[in-house]
Image: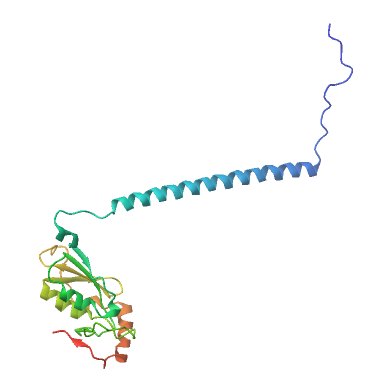
């Protein structure tokens, strides 16, 4: 027979005071906040990892493609000369060996619509004016026609021009006029600056 215990082995805990209850509540909420922050950090890390993997994959996709015919490397060409140096017209004029399907170049939209001018060729030319530089869109259109290209448009500010080889994509990219590409607000504002350089020695492109 088990003897009776005259008193309980474990005394019941006294009820928590208001201060202790509030302290426990704060600790619980603090733990919840810490867990949420850790979950957000883990989610951010996962997003960065996915973006990094995607970027690495895109870099692999966009690596330089090799062609059996070296001329195919130049199917799409951008004239690699800052239009501030006045070279775009003269660089394209000098290119006679390769004929890209698409040519992109920068023009100077301070020149009035329809004017066909460029800065004269000078190996020592240094751009010292925001407005006396580069080449007009119409001048590049005329040079393009000589080379068998047509203007198919510009970007939203009117000075990055796109030319396509005649016989390529004509059903999708018809020829447009230089005047139709210079109606944007930026080009209209830039033409107010023409008077500051109108008397400078521009080269007329026939």
Residue 66 vs residue 39, the one in the foreground: 66
Residue at 57% across, 45% down: 38
Q: Note whether 178 is above or below 49 in the view shown.
A: below
Residue 118 vs residue 5, the one in the foreground: 118
Q: Residue 184: x and y, percent? A: 30, 77
**Residue 133 in view of the camera:** yes
**Residue 178 in view of the camera:** no
Q: Residue 43: x and y, percent? A: 50, 46
Q: From the viewer's perspective, tell me whether residue 77 is left or right of residue 19.
A: left
Residue 17 in which image quadrant: top right
Q: Note whether 69 is above or below 30 in the view shown.
A: below
Q: Residue 18: x and y, percent? A: 80, 43
Residue found at the far bottom of this picture = 199
Quarter of the image that includes the C terminus: bottom left
Residue found at the far top of this picture = 1
Residue at 31% across, 74% down: 157
Quarter of the image that includes the N terminus: top right
Residue found at the far front of this picture = 124
Number of labels in the image equals 0
Residue 82 in which image quadrant: bottom left
Residue at 11% across, 76% down: 146
Q: Note whether 20 is above or below 67 in the view shown.
A: above
Residue at 10% across, 65% down: 167
Residue 144 vs residue 180, the one in the foreground: 144
Q: How is the image coloured?
A: rainbow
Q: Residue 132: x and y, percent? A: 29, 86
């Amino acid at each position: 027979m088990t003897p009776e215990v005259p008193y309980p082995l474990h005394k019941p805990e006294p009820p928590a005071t208001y201060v202790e209850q509030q302290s426990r509540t704060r600790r619980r909420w603090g733990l919840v906040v810490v867990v949420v922050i850790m979950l957000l950090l883990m989610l951010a890390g996962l997003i960065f990892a996915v973006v990094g993997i995607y970027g690495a994959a895109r870099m692999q996709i966009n690596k330089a493609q090799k062609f059996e015919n070296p001329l195919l490397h130049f199917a799409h060409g951008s004239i690699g000369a800052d239009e501030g140096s006045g070279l775009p017209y003269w660089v394209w004029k000098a290119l006679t060996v390769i004929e890209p399907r698409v040519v992109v170049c920068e023009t100077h939209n301070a020149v009035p619509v329809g004017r066909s001018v460029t800065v004269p060729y000078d190996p020592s030319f240094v751009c010292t004016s925001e407005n006396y530089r580069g080449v007009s869109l119409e001048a590049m259109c005329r040079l393009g026609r000589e080379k068998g290209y047509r203007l198919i448009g510009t970007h939203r500010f009117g000075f990055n021009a796109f030319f396509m080889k005649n016989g390529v994509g004509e059903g999708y990219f018809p020829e447009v006029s230089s005047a139709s590409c210079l109606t944007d607000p930026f080009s209209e504002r830039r033409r107010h600056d023409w008077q500051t350089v109108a008397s400078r020695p521009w080269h007329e492109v026939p």
